[in-house]
């Protein structure tokens, strides 16, 4: 009886808070994860934050095509005592330094994965493992500017692209994302993962 009650309470906790929004997506679709700073947002001046050229449109296009979109971003422990507080601190940091004409769109992201401790920061495996668990076995990509993080993600099976702001194409062209995932994802997957994406 007690074991059943404990299980019930755990399930209710997962369904009631940010844990559910963050980790409970079971829809079989590929995931494209991004680093935030210096990959989506130009952070060379923290008082003048803005999208990299084309980043907002690119995220919207991936979403329109049906892909799950996520962030895996490092923040220090000092950002808060729990997930919600850490996320709010990150959002405030972005808001306070934002100068772009286009508002930063948090709603485009299906998941934001943050380290709870400094030891969980990328390139440590913790955040990458959480992302793969959320993907339910579907192909998953990671795009970021840090080469060590790219190597770590690739080691876990992610399809990866090293972001370089001097490249002609900053991201994998949206028309090529499906073929990129099929070619670069390092694990087996069910073909039905692609049924709902263009």
Image (cartoon, rainbow, N blue to C red):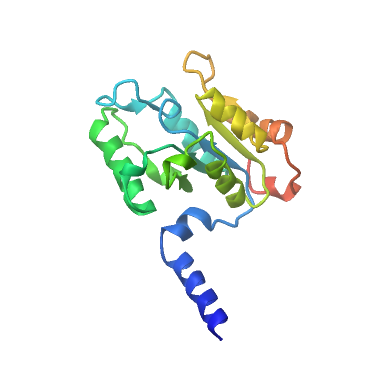
- Residue 133: percent from left, percent from top: 61, 51
Q: Who is closer to the viewer here, 174 or 188?
A: 188
Q: Quadrant of the C terminus?
A: top right
Question: Quarter-wise, where is residue 129 in the image?
Answer: top right
- Above or below, 43 against 185 in this view is above
Q: At 62% from the left edge and 44% from the top edge, which residue is drawn? A: 30
Say how many tags the image has: 0
Q: Left or right? Give the position of 89 relative to 115.
A: left
Q: At 34% from the left edge and 20% from the top edge, which residue is drawn? A: 44
Q: Left or right? Give the position of 3 relative to 53.
A: right
Q: Left or right? Give the position of 99 relative to 44.
A: left
Q: Who is closer to the viewer here, 26 or 87?
A: 87
Q: Left or right? Give the position of 27 relative to 82.
A: right
Regarding residue 172, the answer to whether it shows in the image is no
Question: Quarter-wise, where is residue 180 in the image?
Answer: top right
Regarding residue 85, the answer to whether it shows in the image is yes
Q: At 32% from the left edge and 32% from the top edge, which residue is drawn? A: 102
- Residue 15: percent from left, percent from top: 47, 67
- Residue 188: percent from left, percent from top: 76, 44
Which residue occupies the extreme front position in the image?
119
């Amino acid at each position: 009886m007690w074991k059943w009650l404990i299980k019930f309470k755990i399930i209710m906790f997962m369904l009631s808070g940010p844990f559910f929004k963050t980790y409970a997506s079971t829809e079989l679709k590929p995931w494209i994860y991004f680093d935030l700073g210096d990959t989506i947002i130009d952070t060379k001046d923290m008082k003048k934050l803005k999208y990299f050229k084309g980043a907002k449109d690119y995220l919207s296009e991936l979403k329109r095509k049906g892909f799950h979109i996520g962030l895996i971003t490092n923040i220090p422990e000092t950002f808060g005592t729990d997930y919600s507080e850490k996320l709010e601190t990150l959002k405030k940091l972005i808001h306070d330094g934002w100068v772009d004409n286009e508002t930063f769109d948090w709603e485009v992201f299906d998941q934001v994965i943050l380290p709870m401790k400094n030891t969980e920061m990328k390139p440590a495996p913790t955040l990458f493992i959480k992302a793969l668990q959320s993907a339910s076995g579907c192909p998953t990509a990671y795009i970021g500017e840090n080469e060590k993080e790219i190597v770590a993600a690739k080691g876990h099976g992610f399809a990866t692209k090293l972001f370089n702001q001097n490249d002609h194409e900053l991201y994998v062209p949206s028309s090529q994302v499906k073929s990129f995932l099929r070619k670069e994802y390092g694990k087996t997957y069910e073909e039905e993962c692609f049924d709902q994406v263009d």
